[in-house]
Amino acid sequence: MKIESLIEKTPFIQIFGGWITLIVLFGIIFSLGDSKLASKEEISLEEGFYLSFSLSAASVGYTNITPVGKGRVIAMIEVILSLMIYGIAISKLVSVKQETILEEVYKISFDEHVNRLRSMLYVCRSDLSRIIEKIAEKRASNAKIMESSIYIQTLSNAMADIEKLLHHNKKDSTYVKKLDFMTFEVLINSMNVSMEKVGEFFNALNEHRISVDREVFTIHLGSIYETSRWIIASYGEIDDIKIKKKLEILGSLNKKIKDMISEGERAKEKN
């Protein structure tokens, strides 16, 4: 595992440099050994490099100079080391290609996930807007109003998924794409608008004095409150001014959510 990790971290320039070093080192050995290591009485440094290159690059050594005696052992060692370097280079090429493909797959998956979350928040707002209009026009049945808990649950689920994405942001992983500031800002803004719509929904209920069983609503509101509180606590010290303002808005909206939860608990105690 450590060897694989080392190969992944080693750049191609270092692998190439290692191969050149191997050629130079064994070329010097052959030139110093002369007739003891090769089929020639005197081997110049240039000829030593030539022999070393033919062994290392072609792994055959078919030249006018051939290794003899102990030179054959040295030649075998060079060929083996050269083959190992070739293997590392090929492994690196395959690894880079795989990483590129995986990064692209994770990017597409991540973008689809973010778009799905934005769609969930938009659908939640749209559904709540329709029920608020019906309440204002006094056309909303009690059953339809209770169905609104599903819309608030959608908001709760979307925010829980956003929290998971933000948890990944704090992890150091190669294949987990992290939220950039722009995407984070868009998601926080979408959460804020959705939570505002939840506030409008409960205001409409209070304004028209519509009594509903708030226990189901309170459960989902509690989840929204906890998620918002975690996001504010985790990212409240961020330097980006725009995001900081969005988080301040989220904080004020979360206080209203807490008031709604308290109101639901009081209504439950009365019953």
Image: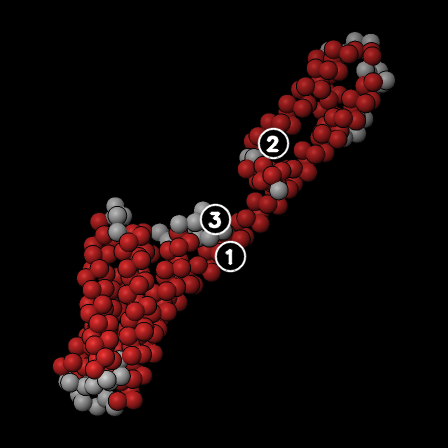
- Kindly indicate whether the residue at mark 2 contacts the one at mark 1 (C-beta within 8 angstroms): no
Residue pointed to by mark 2? 15
217 displayed left or right of 259? right
Q: Is residue 123 at all visible to an observer of this figure?
A: no
207 displayed left or right of 35? left
Give whichever of 209, 264 is nearer the camera.
264
Distance from Cα at disc 3 to Cα at disc 1: 15 Å
Distance from Cα at disc 3 to Cα at disc 2: 25 Å
**Residue found 23% across the figure and 79% down from its top:** 269
Which tag, 3 or 2, sits closer to the chain's start? 2
What number is the disc on residue 61? none
Compared to residue 249, the image places residue 5 above or below, namely above
Distance from Cα at disc 1 to Cα at disc 2: 28 Å
Which tag, 3 or 1, sits closer to the chain's start? 1
Please identify the quarter of the rendering in which residue 67 is found. top right
Please identify the quarter of the rendering in which residue 231 is found. bottom left
Image position, residue 178 (x, y; %): 40, 52
92 displayed left or right of 249? right
Which amino acid, mark 2? Ile
Image position, residue 203 (x, y; %): 17, 77
**Residue found 28% across the figure and 59% down from its top:** 229
242 displayed left or right of 151? left
Residue pointed to by mark 3? 173
Badge nearest the viewer, 3 or 1: 3
Badge nearest the viewer, 3 or 2: 3
Residue pointed to by mark 1? 105
Q: Residues within 10 Å of mark 1 (few under 14, many from 20)?
A: few
Give whichever of 89, 6 is nearer the camera.
6
User: For the residue labelled by badge 3, is the local secondary structure a helix, a strand or a loop?
Assistant: loop
Please identify the quarter of the rendering in which residue 195 is found. bottom left
User: For the residue labelled by badge 2, is the local secondary structure a helix, a strand or a loop?
Assistant: helix
